[in-house]
Image (tube, helix red, strand yellow):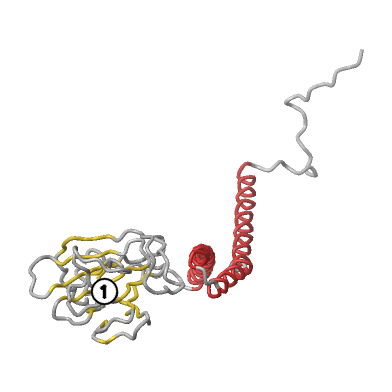
């Protein structure tokens, strides 16, 4: 029978000095932390490199070419139905292109901010914290806040399928609610009235017609019902258009009215849109009956 290997007794001689001792637990812990830290740094470098490459590539050239082609087709098309279909395609392509550009810009800003913060923390030593003073004076003088207009009835325009009285610009589209920074309202001031001012919100409408309404018992061929009625007897049936772009900004365009449209005290040129900024007043034909002011919602 083969002999069994004898077990080493507790009294066996210790290891020789030439044999390397096994690493202790603290040493293994330091090695693992070192590997984890270096692996995290390498992963962060790869992520930044990939994000920078994505930002440099930018939006797809094929998407730009498709958009340019559809815009050329829109200008050349004469059929109204086909023109509306092409306009819808242009709006969708512009939305995709805009989302890609904004994502690329946000990524670039994020990378630049990380680099600036890392460099600042590395170069500048930490300043000792100072106790906060009581009742510090503001460094910037606060501007007086305009008193809010008494809120009256608010009318939000709903999307419509009726055709506009004039050709709309290509940028006049339904706004993307994710990109609208400030929701604007058109406040109507009636001269000598103590009733709270009525307000009109464009909502998801890309355009709205301003004009003088016909009496209920009068019919006129080709008459287009205005979205915002004008009380002045000198106003035209189709007086002006309020246009909205994808950011929610509003523009005012006179469409060949008899007595003109005025924005900020200046008369608008016919068929030339002009941006209507918050706080600016507008009137149509005359300002004795009523005026309109653009204000952010809730003010």
Q: Position of residue 172 (x, y in %)?
A: 42, 70
- Say how many tags the image has: 1
Q: Is 196 on the left-hand or right-hand side of 254?
A: left
Is the C terminus in the top left, top right, bottom left or bottom right quadrant?
bottom left
Residue 190 image point, x, y percent: 13, 73
Q: Which residue is mark 1?
A: 237
- The quarter holding residue 257 reads bottom left
| Residue 111 in view (yes/no) | no
Residue 207, given in percent of the width and then of the height, sits at 35, 68
Q: Quadrant of residue 173?
A: bottom left
The answer to whether residue 152 is seen in the rendering is yes
- Which sits in the foreground, 279 or 43? 279
Residue for point 63% across, 54% down: 39
What crowding class fits label 1: few (fewer than 14 Cα within 10 Å), some (14-19), or many (20 or more)?
A: many
Q: Residue furthest right?
A: 1
Quarter in which the N terminus is drawn: top right
In depth, the one of 206 and 39 nearer the eye is 206
For the point 18% across and 82% down, the residue is 286
Specify whether 82 is left or right of 200: right
From the top left corner, tell me how far across and down residue 64 is, in percent.
59, 70
Residue placed most toward the observer, 88 or 250: 88
In the displayed structure, does residue 187 sit left or right of residue 249? Answer: left
Q: Is residue 190 left or right of residue 165?
A: left
Instruction: Using the image as rendered, state which of residue 178 and residue 132 is in the foreground.
Output: 178
Q: Secondary structure at mark 1?
A: loop
């Amino acid at each position: 029978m083969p002999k069994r290997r004898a077990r080493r007794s507790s009294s066996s001689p210790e290891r020789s000095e030439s044999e390397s001792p096994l690493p202790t637990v603290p040493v293994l812990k330091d090695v693992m932390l070192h590997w984890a830290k270096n692996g995290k740094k390498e992963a962060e470098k790869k992520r930044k490199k990939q994000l920078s490459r994505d930002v440099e590539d930018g939006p797809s050239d094929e998407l730009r070419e498709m958009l340019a082609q559809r815009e050329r087709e829109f200008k050349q098309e004469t059929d109204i139905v086909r023109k509306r279909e092409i306009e819808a395609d242009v709006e969708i392509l512009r939305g995709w292109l805009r989302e890609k550009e904004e994502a690329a810009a946000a990524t670039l800003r994020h990378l630049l901010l990380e680099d600036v913060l890392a460099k600042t923390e590395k170069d500048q030593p930490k300043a000792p914290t100072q106790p906060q003073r009581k009742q510090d004076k503001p460094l910037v003088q606060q501007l007086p806040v305009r008193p809010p207009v008494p809120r009256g009835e608010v009318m939000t325009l709903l999307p419509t399928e009726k055709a506009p009285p004039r050709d709309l610009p290509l940028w006049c589209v339904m706004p993307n609610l994710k990109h609208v920074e400030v929701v604007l309202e058109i406040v109507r001031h009636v001269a000598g009235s103590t009733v709270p001012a009525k307000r009109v919100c464009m909502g998801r409408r890309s355009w709205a017609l301003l004009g003088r309404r016909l009496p209920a018992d009068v019919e006129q061929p080709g008459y287009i019902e205005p979205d915002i009625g004008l009380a002045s007897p000198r106003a035209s049936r189709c007086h002006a258009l309020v246009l909205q772009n994808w950011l929610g900004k509003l523009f005012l365009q006179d469409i060949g009215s008899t007595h003109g449209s005025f924005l900020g005290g200046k008369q608008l040129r016919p068929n030339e849109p002009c941006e209507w900024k918050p706080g600016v007043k507008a009137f149509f034909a005359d300002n004795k009956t009523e005026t309109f002011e653009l204000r952010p919602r809730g003010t």
